[in-house]
Image: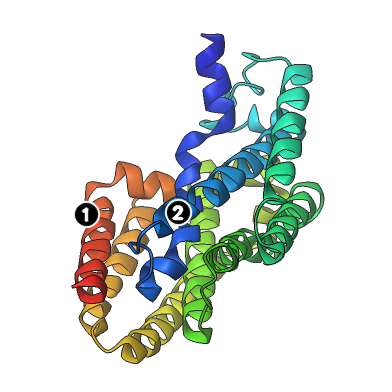
């Protein structure tokens, strides 16, 4: 049982976010060149350890609030399955190892990793309680992963790709906050203070605005790639489906939605297949 609690503390399902590191080489058409894929394994492992460390420290800080949450109350620290001292040691070890391994990678990758860790620290200590700031902190975690992947593979991230990922991440982050607010109801402010600062309908508006912007930037990006224009309807469908999941009472967490909603999983899989065929065949 302790082993299971440790695994849950690491949140390995959230490592799916670190696949963003492979976006630049995948979309750039170089991911499947000889030796290219293996080049990304160490950067991926580094970000998995670093992100797990940030999750652990965040859980340490929020364990009292998590006990008020209907889902998070079962997390290892909030539920008492693991002692806080053990979590501090494990988180510190993961953080030290990830930083040490990052010195074996390009300097630019190390810089993006430090930016990610700095943002995570600022989010956990201050910005998670500040409306709008909290959404942008979550979103730029994805952006930093994107640029870290470009640095690791030596692939330039285009302006349109940056804008598409940033706006999509803002869209998903707003959906995550809206999902939390709908789940917790009147008690939302007891768990996350920033939720009390969002007037009724504001998070819906953020989703609609950023979702529309995503379609624009995504369309401009795929136009530059010529063969990818046929993925735009699929992207539109995915945005609509995500909003439907959130409005139906889903958590809004992008990883949970992708894993638990079969339609969203198929949309993601089909997008990868369509882009792969257009890029590599």
Of all residues shown, which one is farthest toward the front?
34
Asked if residue 136 lies left or right of residue 177, the reply is: right
* Front-most of residues 85 and 70: 85
Q: Quadrant of residue 2?
A: top right
Q: Nearer the viewer, mark 1 or mark 2?
A: 2
Pinpoint residue 69: horizontal percent, then vertical percent: 58, 33
**Residue matched to label 1:** 266
Q: Say few, some or many: other residues with alpha carbon within 10 Å of mark 2 (under 14 / 14 to 19 / 20 or more).
A: some
**Residue matched to label 2:** 19
Above or below residue 126? Residue 205 is below
What residue lies at 43% left-to-right and 85% top-to-bottom? 217
What residue lies at 37% left-to-right and 81% top-to-bottom? 215
Residue 12 visible to the viewer:
yes
Pinpoint residue 18: horizontal percent, then vertical percent: 51, 52
Asked if residue 9 lies left or right of residue 119, the reply is: left
Which SS class for mark 1? helix
Pinpoint residue 58: horizontal percent, then vertical percent: 71, 39
Quadrant of the frame with the C terminus: bottom left
* Front-most of residues 2 and 93: 93
CA distance separating discs 1 and 2:
17 Å
Which SS class for mark 2? helix
């Amino acid at each position: 049982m302790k082993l299971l609690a440790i695994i849950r503390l690491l949140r390995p399902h959230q490592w799916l976010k670190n696949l963003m590191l492979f976006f630049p080489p995948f979309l750039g058409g170089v991911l499947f060149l000889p030796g290219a894929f293996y080049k990304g394994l160490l950067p991926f492992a580094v970000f998995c350890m670093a992100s797990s460390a940030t999750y652990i420290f965040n859980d340490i800080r929020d364990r009292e609030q998590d006990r008020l949450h209907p889902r998070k109350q079962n997390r290892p620290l909030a539920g008492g399955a693991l002692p806080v001292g053990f979590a501090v040691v494990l988180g510190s070890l993961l953080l030290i190892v990830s930083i040490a391994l990052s010195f074996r990678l390009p300097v630019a990758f190390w810089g993006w990793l430090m930016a990610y860790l700095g943002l995570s620290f600022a989010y956990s200590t201050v910005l998670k309680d500040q409306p709008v700031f909290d959404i942008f902190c979550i979103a730029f975690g994805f952006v930093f992963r994107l640029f870290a992947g470009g640095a690791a593979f030596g692939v330039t991230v285009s302006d349109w790709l940056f804008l598409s990922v940033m706006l999509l991440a803002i869209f998903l982050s707003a959906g995550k906050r809206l999902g939390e607010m709908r789940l917790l109801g009147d008690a939302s402010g007891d768990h996350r203070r920033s939720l009390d600062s969002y007037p009724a309908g504001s998070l819906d508006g953020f989703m609609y605005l950023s979702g529309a912007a995503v379609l624009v930037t995504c369309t401009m990006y795929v136009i530059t790639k010529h063969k990818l224009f046929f993925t735009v309807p699929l992207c539109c469908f995915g945005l609509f489906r995500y909003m439907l999941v959130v409005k139906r009472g889903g958590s809004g967490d992008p990883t949970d939605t992708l894993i638990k909603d079969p339609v969203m999983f198929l949309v993601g899989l089909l997008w990868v297949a369509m882009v792969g065929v257009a890029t590599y065949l």
